[in-house]
Every structure is written in C-alpha cells, then in structure tokens.
Amino acid sequence: MAKSKTFQRFCGCIEIKEEPKQVAKVDDPLGSLPVGALEDIGTPSYLEKLYQGIRNDFEHSGSKFEETSEGLHTKGVDLKRIEDEKKRLRELLIIIDGDVAFPTGKSTLTPKAKELIAKIADALVAYPETNCRIGGHTDSVGSFQSNLKLSKDRSFAVKAELKNSHSIAEERFVEVDGYADLRKVVDTMLAEKKNRRTEIYVGTVRIVY
C-alpha cells in the first residue's frame, strides 16, 4: 500500500505531477486527418469527415449551405455526394458556378473564384490522402471549338491556382480537361448558367472499405 500513488499523495512523500491537459483547437472548423487514416477508417468515413469539414469551413466564414437532394448548395458553389449502390460515399463533387468563377468568354479567375479555390486547396492539404479531377464546361452558345478551348483553359486555370498558389502536388491531379457542352446539365442550345461550370471531383487515393 505504501507504494501506491494514493498513499504517497496522502502522506506527502512525493509530489504527483498532473498530466498536461490537451487543449482543443477551437478555430479549426475544417479539421484534418493524418497520413495513414485512410487505411484505418476506409474511404466512406474519410470522405464523410472531409464533407463535413468543408461544410463547417464555409459556414464558419459566413457562407450558409442549403440542403439539396444531392448534397449542399451555397452561392457560387455546390457540394455533391457521389455514392455507390450501397449509399457509401465514393467521391465528392465540388461545382463552381462559371458565372462566378470567370468573366464571360475568359479563363482568368475572378477574386471570388480564388477565394473558393483556396478553401478547396485547404481541404486537400488537411486531408492528404485525396486526389482530384477537374473538368471545365460551357453552354452551347458560340462555336464548339472555341468553347472546347475555353473549357480546357478554365480547368487548367483552376489547376494552376491549386498547384502554384497552394502547393498541391502534381501527382494529385488525376485528370484535368475541358468538355465544352458535351456534358450538359440542362439539355438546351440556349445560354444556360447551369451548363457553365467547373467541376472538381475529390476522391481518395484508393478505395478502402
């Protein structure tokens, strides 16, 4: 009994040092996962944490999301869930409104677009076992060839912003391309803002269940 910490504390024989308390980060809405977490928790749980983290990060900075049938929407951005047949999360799809991201007919990112991309970059850094695919899309107004070039230029502009300004490694870009109006959201030949968009698919480096 004399060797127990309770007895030693009572008699004053030794000074028992208290374990330092862990101080939680109170201003880290995005959260993060260490390398190796994917193997431990699997792709669906990994992406659920990323999904919630992105939502928290946007809302922490004042952008309130609305719930949709496919995920979340806020001004200029949609965050959609890509699920398998068992409703397990396989990828996240981040859609940046083309009218917000670029001036008409140009591939120069607007200041607002750079803000949005910075948040996506922060998420990629915080969740390092992810990669992404970037696709540019236009409506059907104008010639197909000019729209194809514009859509490709826009997707590479997004990649350049992620890579050069936020140090996202080249190997994390699985695919970067433009599709003009070949993958319409709304089937029309008219000017349609839903068809003018940049899509960023974020998935894990491999599927783990």
Image (spheres, helix red, strand yellow):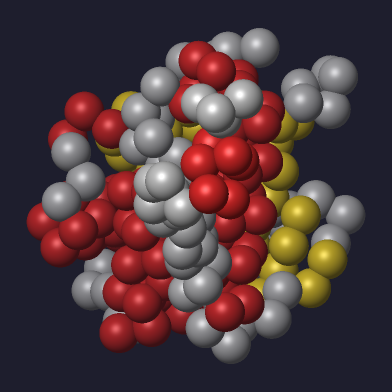
Position of residue 173 measured from the top left corner of the image (x, y, whole percent): 29, 34
- Is residue 171 visible from the viewing direction of this image? yes
**Relative to 167, residue 100 above or below:** below
At 39% across and 52% down in the image, what residue appears? 15
Farthest residue, direction left = 164
Specify whether 173 is left or right of 3.
Answer: left
Identified at 69% across, 81% down, the residue is 64
- Residue 77 lies in what quarter of the image? bottom right
Q: Quadrant of the C terminus?
A: top right
> Residue drawn 52% across and 83% down?
61
**Residue at point 46% right, 63% down?**
23
146 sits left or right of 3 in the view: left
If the image is split into quadrants, where does the N terminus sit? top right
Of residue 96 and residue 197, the one placed in the foreground of this image is 96
Q: In this rendering, would 57 be left or right of 158?
A: right
* Residue 132: quarter of image: top left
